[in-house]
Image (cartoon, coloured by chain):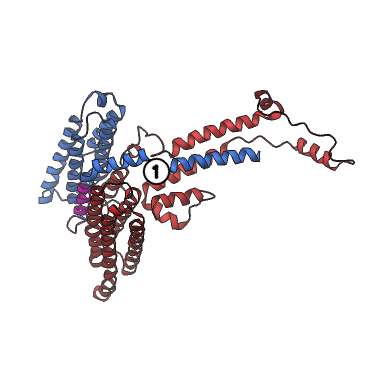
Chain colours: A blue, B red
Amino acid sequence: MTRTALTLTLFAGLSLWASGQDGAPLMERRLKQFEANRLLLSQLIDHGLKLSSAEKGGNTLARAEECRLAAATLAAALKAAPGDDPDRVAELGDHIAAVVRDGLVPNLTQAGQDIRPGSQDYERLKDLSRLSNEDVIAIVAAFPTGDRLERSSKVADARSRLADAGRKIIVIK
Amino acid sequence: MTCDAIQNRLLALPDPRQVPDELRGHLDGCLACRAFLTRAVRLDKLLAAIPVPPSSEETRAAFLDRVTEAGPVIKRIPVVRRRDSATDLLENGRWQYAAAGLAAAVLVAVGWLAFRDGGTPPSRNDPATVAGHDLLKKTIGHVVTDEKALAKVDKPEQRMQTWADVTTDLRDEIGRVYRHAPKDDLKSLAELFEKVAEHGLLQQADLAVTRGQEPIARRQELLQKTIQRVSEVETDLAAFVQSAPEDKKLALRQIRETARKVREGLTNLQPRLVGVWPAKGV
């Protein structure tokens, strides 16, 4: 039994060691990903800087506006995604869904509770909720298409998750 | 420490569920290492679940009886049998070894699947597990989607910590790629690092000091921790510079210099934090 246990441990150890090696294909992929996302990363950091500013930091309406812009930044990257790369399209689609679901919607909802109807900010909020809703509908409708993309369940799922996230936007009339 | 170093230490733990505090700090801020730990715990459970043939009390008692009975212990010269036949495996309970060997093979396959780049296959229902660029995912998390994301937290002290997380993520990325990345990529990483560390972290620390909402003692503690983190980043970057190929050193030196400036800037904020104490009338 000791021998079996040792064999198992050895195999498991070897498996872990082998998988832990940062092999050339993995490194190549990592570098390609960085090159593909270099501009996007910089733009997202800029959104983060604006979200951190003294003016926007504690203001839910301003934060919701910035989240809408972050979603638009990602949507531009989605539009530019290669038509034969369902993984890339699904990845970006899911990121937009996450930004809408976890950033835009909660801040909009909170702003709706914080801002008094009739105030100047309330008008901004109404516009923002309407525009955000229209944005998401437009992104879902313009999801990149192509043979490979249409066959991909990942892409279909990402698109459906984005549509779900968009439905959570409460449009103030 | 880089993610690779942290993950090596996680692998060396006797029980991956018992993570020491020194590693816990990194895990709290690093999605990749948390996922790695989850997979390590899973593998540990799989190992424990492998069926072990029950030890036979009767066999053990018979063996002890034979050893302790009167007369010579060795009564016959044992014949060594060929052990490479399938029949032999099935006789004398050796099928158990075959089963264990098969289990080992399955385990190796599971281990390989679990630990090859990215881990478990993407779940269709969990957007967080969709394969993609790790740094992009983390950055979106810090900016918008995580619990402590910049789009969610109200206090500059919290934002300072989030920017410190972004800074360490970038350090980790630099640590992974600096030997192989083209110069342009390293230059971009240096620009990103400057933006994150100087315009994000340092400016937010300044806001935390001057307009923070936490008690002074708590702000001092957070600032001290942040200085410590940036200091570690600076040390790691110095190590990267040492081991980098000659043509990569320039960009890495620039990143290290940014880290040094930010560490100094944070250190210079400390007296100001003490200085606002009487002004607040606390």
**At 68% from the left edge and 35% from the top edge, which residue is drawn?**
B54
- Of the 4 image quadrants, the one containing the N terminus of chain A is top right
Farthest right residue in view: B71
Relative image position of residue A50 (x, y in whole percent)? 18, 53
- Residue A121 is left or right of residue A167, and the answer is left
As drawn, B93 above or below A11: above
Instruction: Identify the magenta region.
Output: A42-56
**A173 vs B1, nearest the viewer:** B1
- Residue A42 is left or right of residue A152, and the answer is left
- Check the residue under mark 1 and report the chain it is in: A
Relative image position of residue B176 (x, y in whole percent)? 35, 48
Amino acid type of the residue that numbered disc 1 sits on in the rendered structure: Asp
Relative image position of residue A144 (x, y in whole percent)? 20, 30
**B169 vs B224, nearest the viewer:** B169
As drawn, B276 above or below B250: below
- Of the 4 image quadrants, the one containing the C terminus of chain A is top left
